[in-house]
């Protein structure tokens, strides 16, 4: 099923965590990522907007029409059929990517930020959870939360890079960056107890991914001001830090096994998203 393995190229934190998955499951997660990355690359390449729009429409139509000549699309439909993934989730992903195919992108509210983060990343978290055989509704909502949290981390990290591409998801101020990281923390917290619902052989990998990605936000906060933030370039988690976070994930795994609390009563911050998108229809 594995084709291009964009996971190893573009998502080193996820790829690191994927090391702890069974091989067949890793390949299925990688196939999902290949599809999402292939679509996202259309919005991110250096073509003119008109060319991007044409390429995006072509890719979307190839997906809708099940053009199995494209192995990425063929593999994605295989996942959809095997794990009963609603195509509404894929439609949401497409909407998010399509919103980036503009000369200028500007989000103006928390609601717009959360809807965008759901579309481009919460969708991926939800589809990934289905591949990991998560079935419980609150747990699937928490998978959306983890995807949103990671996207908010991305947005906080990439303010200067996004500015070069005329994308302004948040303002270029350290206060706004801190606020976005603080918002991400709520979503990271909401994701924790649901990891108990993931089969044991997959659980540790998700804990590692969660810890490693969350670490990026902590490193951003350590910059303390916008000047240091700008000087630092792209903030990432080093291999040594990944090893440390991996060991700390062992304690998370133990904590999960000892606590009785589950995710049934978590207050998911989905009200703003649900004003526009009915998440229950996706789950």
Image: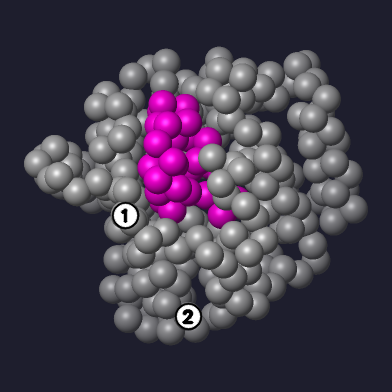
Residue plotted at (83% across, 25% down): 65
In reply to whether residue 133 is colored magenta, the answer given is yes
Q: Residues within 10 Å of mark 2 (few under 14, many from 20)?
A: few
Q: Is residue 235 above or below residue 98?
A: below
Residue plotted at (67% across, 68% down): 167
Residue plotted at (85% across, 49% down): 53
Name the residue nearer the viewer: 89 or 62.
89
The residue to which callout 1 is attached is: 265
Q: Position of residue 25 (x, y in %)?
A: 41, 21
**Disc nearer the start of the sequence (2/1):** 2
Which mark identifies residue 176?
2
Q: Position of residue 232 (x, y in %)?
A: 40, 70
In the shown orientation, is residue 251 left or right of residue 274? left
How far separated are the C-alphas under marks 2 and 1?
A: 30 Å
Q: Position of residue 124 (x, y in %)?
A: 53, 42
Image quadrant occupied by the N terminus: top right
Q: Residue furthest front?
A: 265
- Magenta stretch, residue numbers: 118-147
In reply to whether residue 199 is colored magenta, the answer given is no
Q: Secondary structure at mark 2?
A: helix
Q: Position of residue 6 (x, y in %)?
A: 55, 33
Name the residue nearer the viewer: 166 or 192.
192
Which mark identifies residue 59?
none
Q: Quadrant of residue 267?
A: bottom left
Q: Residues within 10 Å of mark 1 (few under 14, many from 20)?
A: few
């Amino acid at each position: 099923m594995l084709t291009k393995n964009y996971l190893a190229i573009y998502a080193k934190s996820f790829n690191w965590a994927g090391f702890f998955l069974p091989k067949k499951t890793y390949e299925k997660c990688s196939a999902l990522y290949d599809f999402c990355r292939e679509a996202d690359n259309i919005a991110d390449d250096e073509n003119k907007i008109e060319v991007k729009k044409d390429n995006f429409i072509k890719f979307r139509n190839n997906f809708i029409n099940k053009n199995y000549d494209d192995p990425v699309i063929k593999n994605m439909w295989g996942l959809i059929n095997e794990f009963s993934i609603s195509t509404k989730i894929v439609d949401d992903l497409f909407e998010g990517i399509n919103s980036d195919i503009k000369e200028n992108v500007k989000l103006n509210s928390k609601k717009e930020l959360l809807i965008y983060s759901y579309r481009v990343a919460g969708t991926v978290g939800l589809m990934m959870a289905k591949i990991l055989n998560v079935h419980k509704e609150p747990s699937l909502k928490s998978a959306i939360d983890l995807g949103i949290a990671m996207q908010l981390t991305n947005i906080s990290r990439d303010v200067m890079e996004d500015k070069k591409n005329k994308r302004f998801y948040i303002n270029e101020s350290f206060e706004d960056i801190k606020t976005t990281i603080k918002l991400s923390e709520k979503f990271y917290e909401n994701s924790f107890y649901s990891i108990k619902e993931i089969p044991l052989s997959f659980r540790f990998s998700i804990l590692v991914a969660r810890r490693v990605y969350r670490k990026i936000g902590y490193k951003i906060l350590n910059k303390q001001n916008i000047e240091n933030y700008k000087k630092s370039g792209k903030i990432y988690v080093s291999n040594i830090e990944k090893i440390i976070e991996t060991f700390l994930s062992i304690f998370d795994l133990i904590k999960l096994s000892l606590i009785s609390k589950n995710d049934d009563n978590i207050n998911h911050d989905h009200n703003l998203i649900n004003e526009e998108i009915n998440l229950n229809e996706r789950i």
